[in-house]
Structure formats: C-alpha cells, structure tokens
Amino acid sequence: MSKKFVPIIITLTIVSFFIVFKSQGRSDKEDPKVKYAKVLKNVGILIEEAHFSPKKIDDAFSKAMLDKFIEELDDEKSIFIQSDLDGFKKYSTVIDDEIHGKELESFYSINESYQKRLKEVSLLYINLLANPFDFSSDEKIQLDPEKLKYPKTFVERNERWRKRMKYAVLSKFIDLQEDQAKNKGKKGAIDKADSTLEREARDAVRKQMDRYFTTKKTRETQEENFSTFVNTLTGLMDPHTNYFPPIDLRSFNESMSGRFYGIGAQLKENDGKITITSLVAGGPAWKSGELKENDEILKVGQGNNDPVDVTGYAVSDAVKLIRGSEKGSEVRLTVKHIDGSIKVIILIRDEVNTEETFAKSAIIKGENKIGYIYLPEFYADFERPNGARCAADVAKEVEKLKSENVDGIILDLRGNGGGSLYDVVQMAGLFIPSGPICQVKGREENANVLPDNDPATQYKGPLAVMVDGTSASASEIFAAAIQDYKRGIIIGSSSTYGKGTVQRSIPLGDNNSEDDLGSLKLTLQKFYRINGGATQLRGVIPDVILPDRYDYLKFREKDNNNALGWDEIPKANYKLSNTSLTIDKSIPLINEDIVNNSTFNNIKTNVKLIDNYSNKEYSLNINKYKEEQKKMKEVYNRFDELNKLHDALLFNNLVTDTAKINSSVDKVEKNKQWIKVRSSDIYIDESVKVINKLIEQNSFLTPVNK
C-alpha cells in the first residue's frame, strides 16, 4: 500500500479504539450498533482523505444522502407516504455529523419506519386480488417512478397498489388468453371461459406477490439496509466507490458459471426481479446470442414442464432452477428484454469452458481477405507466471492472420468491460511504434504516462476497432489510443461506456481487530487519453457511429448524476501514425455511406419508436392495452428483421486452428455457433465495408510488411 495511506490507517485504528471505548467493552457481535458506527466513520475518513475527488460532507451532502437513501429503499414510491418524508426532514442536516462521529440515529429511525410501512403494504394485495377486476373501465397506470411523487395519504398509496395489481393481472390474463388460442384444437387442450382465465391470472399474481414480499422481508434486514445506507454515501461520491460488508446477503454477483452445469451467466435480484448482469463467454447463454445484460428472467421451465414464475425469487433460488444438475438437460427461460419484448429462450445446460473467454480469430472472405479478432475481456492470470494474458494471445492471433495474408484486421471489443491495464498497454503496442498509451493521475498527483517501450510494430495494415455502449475501462483506453494515433478507425455505438476511473479495495478495520468490518472499493485515480482528455463520462466517440437498439437506454456513466466529471490534462508527447492521412481521408467517405444506408436509418427510426413506447403510461382497458401491445410487437418484429443480415458473411476458421477445433465434438459445435452468430452480424458486415474502404485508399504498406 502507498505511504499516503499510512496516516489514514492510523486514523482508522484510533477511531476504532475510541468507539470501542465509548461502547464500554461491548463487542460488535453483542451490539451491531458499535460495528455500524465504526463502518460509517471509517468509510467517511477514507473518502475524505483518499477519494480522487470527494464531495464535501456537509449539510447539503446530508440532505442529498437522505433523499437518495429514501429512494433506494422505496424506488417505486409505493411504500412511504408524504408524512413519513416530512418526519425524516429532521435528519437532513444531521447525517453528515453522524458520519463524522455523532451518534447514529437517522438510519435506525428511517429503517424502522420502512419496516413498518413494508408490513402494511405487504397485506394490501390479498384483498385487492380477492375479486375480479373490471378491464372495461378507462384507467391508466404510470410505471415510471421518475414521473411519480410519493403518495400523500394512505388512500392514495393503496390506490397505487390497486392499479399495480390490476396491471399485473391484466398482463397475465392476456397471456393466458393467447396461450389458450395457440393450443386450441390440440390434444388435451381445454377451452376455458374468460372468467376462469381471469381468476387463474389473479391466483398466479397472488402467488407471485407472496414470493415477492417473502423475499423482500427476508432479505431487507437491518444489516442489509445498513449496507444500503453506507452505499448511499459512497454512491454520492461516484458510482464505482462501493462498500462491501463481510456477508453480502443479496448475492448480487451469484455466479452460474465455473464447474457447475448451467447457462453461464451472472444474476442479480432487484426489487423482486431476477436480471442478468453479465454472460460468460462460451457458455450456453452467450452462444445463443439471444440473452443480453439487464434482461429480466420471468419464468424458468425444465424441458416441456410448466414454467415457474421466478418474480420475487431470491437469486439463490432462481439459480437452483436454472443451473440444474445434468449436462445436456434443457431449460426454457421466459425473458423480458430491456427493450420490453418478451421471448421464450431454450438453452441446453453445459459446463462453462473458460477457454472461450480468450481471444479468438477467424477470416472473413469477400471483396478482400479480412482478419477478425474477438476479445471478450482484457484478461490476465496473475496467479500463474505462465497464465493466460490477453496481450500475448492477441499477438498470437495477429501472427496467425498475417501468415494467411489478410488485407486488414477487425478487432471486436463490443461487450468488453475491461480488465488488465498492463495488457492494454502491451496490446496497443502491437499496432504502433513505441510511445505513450494512456495517462493515469491520482488526487493531487502529477500524471503518470504509461508507455509502450517496444519499437517494433507487429501489424501495420488497415485496422478497425469495434466498440459499443458496454465497452468500458480498458477497452476505452485501447480504443482511445488507436484513435489518438490515428492508427485505425473506431466503429460502434454513439459512445463507449465512459468509465475512466481506477479503484482499489481497502479494509475498514485495523489489523488487530477481531471484527470484520468489510472493505471499501475506493476511486483513487482517473485515466486520461494521450491527447489529454479523460475517458471518464464521455467515453470514446467512434469515428463511425452505427445506430443500435440500446442507444436510447440510459445506462452509461454519463447517465449517473453522481459520476465524476470530464476534464483534461496536458497531452502526452506522441507522434501520429503514418496511417493518419489515410484515416482522415477515409472517415468522411465512410460516414457518407452510413448517412445513405437505409438499414441503419430504419434502425434509428425504430429506436426512437421504442423509446417513445418505453416512456408512456399504460392503459388498464383491455382493448386499448391489446392495441398498445400489438403496436409494440410490430415495432420489435421490424427491429429484429432489420438486425438480420440476409446475405451471411463468409467466416472461415484459420488453418492453424482446424486441428484444435476438430479435437472434440463439443469444440466443433461451439465453433459452429460462434461462426453462425458473427456471420449474420450487420455490425461486423459494416466493419468489413470500413476496412475495404481503407484498403481502397491504398496508402498502407505492402502486404509483405503487414
């Protein structure tokens, strides 16, 4: 640990002793309040003393923290009423003092009120679902909490819950009607009256709410809500400073990969919803190409058996259903994509092979012979001297592509959330002569330039780098370096994610303490491009922007109000690549083609339509609701059609990879799926056109020197 942390750790130790003394010998295990006081105080000290850009913890911060904590507890504005919020105002100028050592009261008071209100609303749905709903009345429901205010009275709160239950039953009722229509005439099918289907819909929603509140009450303990309280403090500093308690009861990062037979995904639970946080490259979910981050899993079915509605399930319980115990068994997931569309996805369980997370290449044949390299993350095995390193692996793939005399290379960093900074520097050095790759700056420190010191350039030919809105951190550093040197063309979404900060995990307790207080992942530094601009917040703006279906979604760093800002420092000393003239000449020509591309223009139009549908109220009148759903499905279907490449790209494996791929049936099947997904990718197709345009300029070195 840096010497700058020594006085901070000493201060943490003194604070721990002081609080223990005040507790008159009581251990943290006997009185959790003692531990909570330590945690809150120590987190405050670390943030104020070491955070890259700490906000002042004063009365204004206290008010912001109070508002945010209330929002974290009741994000749908359906539990508290306005009088509760009025009562909490007395803490609006107190929480900052509590962080600085005053006795903690605000958390306990707010948490007590929350538990009381939660118990109240947990009883409402029972009576609300006891009788049939009238779907002929002309009512609407607003589901966007940002457009709602907290209910003023109990009557207003209860009415909000009535509409929520009506909406849930209406949606389920229509599903049952559609299922019955599909099965009409089939053996064993029973034609049920609408009144029966409506009752079954209410029964299904009742069971769903039973699980929802059981999970909510079980998981939202005082310990868990205190973690939320502390993370409200850290989150106001920036999105990536986080408190990690000794035991994470929510299991946000429950893994379904590793040695288990599953689908290869990570899940989290949020307010009763099971959503996907990431996909393990090479796993069944990833290979399907149909599951995405932030998709919500609604139901889980084992083969042809009736699916189980997992709304309200704990992550661990949902994992048990999805993971299974046998390789080759079938699981059917009913998934709600983040664009609102719902689909049943059939997956075959398998053991996730981490080898599939490594760099992989292929050749695309067409007008020219193009090399394609896919890198899912900037991986590095720090545990073993000879472990896998992405920079070394990409170097091998480049060498294999050169041996097959490719005319250009596409490097695909879409979905790459980052990883090893060392490997970013080494990998960028494969494409440029020696020079700076990025800059790193800490609080009150001069910028440190991270250079590639190897004067050799492994590949000098046409280069395109694909990114999207989920390309983050290390991916952004690499793309920025290639762009600043004008060594290649960056292609992708309107911007990359925009995470340009560096974190380190710091334990909260002193070394002599028997009590584990958890740790703080603290933002200590920022990344800067060699041109001086930060990658933070703005990310990397591609040279060629291709509209995609998630452009309207607010999930990037810039969409978080507490994200650190963009700034710039003096640029590093570097020389443009000898490809810069070709890059400058090609970009306007390529963008002119995009402007006239009917497919991407239609995608842009449909993205706006989807955005409009996602921001409106929903009718509770069955006829109007059906009409709304019909229009939405039409938009989604058009969108799916636009994203299909009807003339598949000719993807071929490298000759040197053939023997390895054919070594097992499993590898053959995985490779087929890998090729299939990419050969129909319209964004890879467009990247090939970009490379072809570069080749047309004929300003690169001859093939023998690539």
Image (spheres, grey):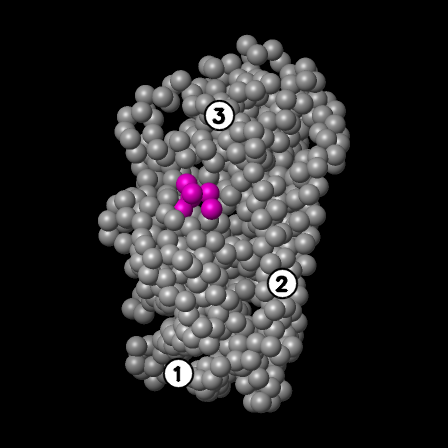
Residue 619 appearing in the image: yes
Q: Nearer the viewer, mark 1 or mark 2?
A: 2
Q: Which residue is mark 3?
A: 651
* Residue at the spot 32% in from the left edge and 64% down from the top edge: 317
Q: Earlier in the sequence, mark 1 or mark 2?
A: 1
Q: Which residue is mark 2?
A: 628
Q: How many marks?
A: 3
Q: CA distance from mark 1 to mark 3?
A: 69 Å
Q: CA distance from mark 2 to mark 3?
A: 40 Å
Q: Name the spot of residue 130 as percent of width and height, x first.
A: 44, 84
Q: Earlier in the sequence, mark 2 or mark 3?
A: 2
Badge 1 vs badge 2, beta-carbon distance below 8 Å: no
Q: Which residues are magenta?
A: 285-290
Q: Which amino acid type is shown beneath numbered disc 2?
A: Glu
* Residue at the spot 50% in from the left edge and 56% down from the top edge: 342
Q: Secondary structure at mark 1?
A: helix
Task: Indicate left or right for 421 with 259 as reference.
Answer: right
Residue 381 appearing in the image: no
Q: CA distance from mark 1 to mark 2?
A: 62 Å
Q: Name the spot of residue 432 as percent of width and height, x first.
A: 58, 25
Q: Which residue is mark 1?
A: 22
